[in-house]
Amino acid sequence: QKKHKVTIVGSGNWGSTIAKILAENTRANAGLFEEEVQMWVYEEDVTIPKDSKYYDEAAGDKPQKLTEVINKYHENIKYLPGIALPSNIVANPDIRDAVRDSTILIFNLPHQFIGNVCKQINGHILPFARGISCIKGVNVTDDGVSLFSEWIGDGLGIYCGALSGANLAREIAAEKWSETTIAYDPPAMDNSRAATPRTGSPNNAAAEIPEIELPHKDARGRTSSTKLTAMPGDYPPLDQDCFRTLFHRPYFHVQLVSDVAGVSLSGALKNVVALAAGFVDGRGWGDNAKAAIMRIGLMEMVKFGKEFFGETVQTATFTESSAGVADLITSCSGGRNFRCAKIAVEKGISVQEVEKQELNGQKIQGTTTAEEVNSFLKARGLESEYPLFTAVNDILLGKRQVDDIPNLMQDS
Ligand code: NAD
Ligand code: 13P
């Protein structure tokens, strides 16, 4: 039987932390997974500071490729400094090469970059691969809201679940205990050797057929073909147990659920609430005000889920899972969205300015999500029904002040 090849698409603060977890588990479960984990890195030059233990006199201050530094020192010195990564993680700057022949694709990058990445890999992945999106954001346009799990899945023609939870990356990278929620509920797959992949219709007449050509469209819509050398039935089943084995660690406890929409929405919307929590904390209003923000924010998250994803979303995902209320609490305590909003109010500068000054290239998601959610609500005349989401966007735009929050929340 073949083993699953795992690729992580993304290598930021959370991406590198998840890569560490995956690589520890592929090493510990050699019967199920190939040991090597491919990690796609958005290539950039980095300079190793003189006081770093990796400073090399010969190289001096010369910029080096981030992938080369990761593969040499087994540390992502820019996005997860100080954390040793397992040596079976291979940093790869070539996205198509990184995903080639992988049966498991983990998407973990800031949500504004996912569209471009998917364009590049469309038609270059196994048609029966399965994905998990660790992205906290939603794809909102005036026409509608879509979840990145759905959007990735539909765009690439694969099933994609979602992982989200109270998961501040640095704590997990330091192996401090936490929980997470994985929503994964794929349609049953015919696991026989002759099973038909979702995006093609190969001749499945004989189990011994070793290679099958499938038509694919590349990013420009041109037809090409991929030679399949294996079929789904050649691998262990890509079921919930497989993903539990891949993600669960003694310090990272996994709860599997089926509510992909609830898990994805919670992770995206809590970032907007965390900005509001930062605003009131920055004004020095204390814990009662922050708790009020969390209460109102949670209500708006549930309302949004029920109103726009009512058929699938479960209230309990917001109120009982790590992806819901627990993530809201941790994000409003120590998340980057919270911290940037707090500093912005204290210094009297914009949140975006703080992000640039403080995060060394890391990206917060709440600012774009607040804007996207607002444009969606505005197009439907529903801004007043979501006063907290609306207030956050108005404060980011300078149309309202933090001091307006109590009045705006009067009826919440
Ligand atoms: P990050 O904030 O560290 O973002 C930087 C990443 O973006 C780097 O890997 C960088 O190489 C990449 N990047 C920059 N420009 C790019 C481009 N043009 N194209 C592609 N990539 C580019 O990233 P992160 O913390 O790993 O966040 C990924 C997702 O995980 C986000 O949706 C975030 O909300 C979520 N998340 C983060 C945490 C956390 O604590 N950091 C925890 C849970 C979930
Ligand atoms: P920030 O992006 O605000 O740091 O949130 C991290 C997170 O999602 C914790 O669960």
Image (tube, grey):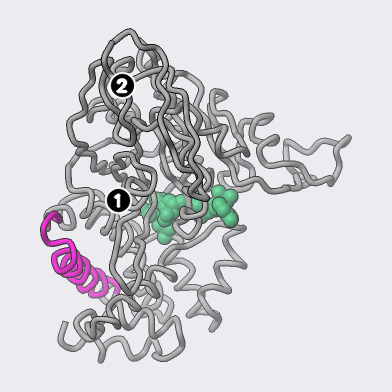
Q: In this view, does 407 lie to the left or right of 354?
A: left
Ligand 2 image-quadrant field: bottom left
Q: Which amino acid does label 2 sit on?
A: Asn
Image location of residue 263, percent across then percent down:
24, 51
Q: Quadrant of the C terminus?
A: bottom left
- Disc with the residue nearer the chain's start (1 vs 2): 1
Residue assigned mark 2: 203
Q: Kindly indicate the quadrant of the structure image that contains residue 128.
A: top left
- The magenta span reads 290-314
Report the residue at 17% width, 43% height from top.
Answer: 258
Q: What residue type is labelled 1?
A: Glu
Image location of residue 354, percent across then percent down:
56, 71
Residue 241 in view: yes
Image location of residue 151, percent across then percent down:
34, 53
Above or below, 402 relative to 64:
below
Q: In this view, does 358 lie to the left or right of 50?
A: left
Residue 173 in view: no
Magenta highlight: main SS = helix
Residue extending furthest right?
A: 58
Asked whether 121 or 308 is in front, the reply is: 121
The numbered mark at residue 170 is none
Q: In this view, does 96 lie to the left or right of 281?
A: right
Q: Does the residue labelled 1 lie within 8 Å of ligand 1?
A: no
Report the residue at 62% width, 67% height from top.
Answer: 357
Within 10 Å of disc 2 (Cα), the crowding (few <14, some 14-19, many 20+) is: few
Q: Kindly indicate the quadrant of the structure image that contains residue 73.
A: top right
Residue assigned mark 1: 150
Marks 1 and 2 in Cβ contact (< 8 Å):
no
Report the residue at 42% width, 91% height from top.
Answer: 399
* Distance Cα–Cα, label 1 vs label 2: 28 Å
Report the residue at 31% width, 81% height from top.
Answer: 390
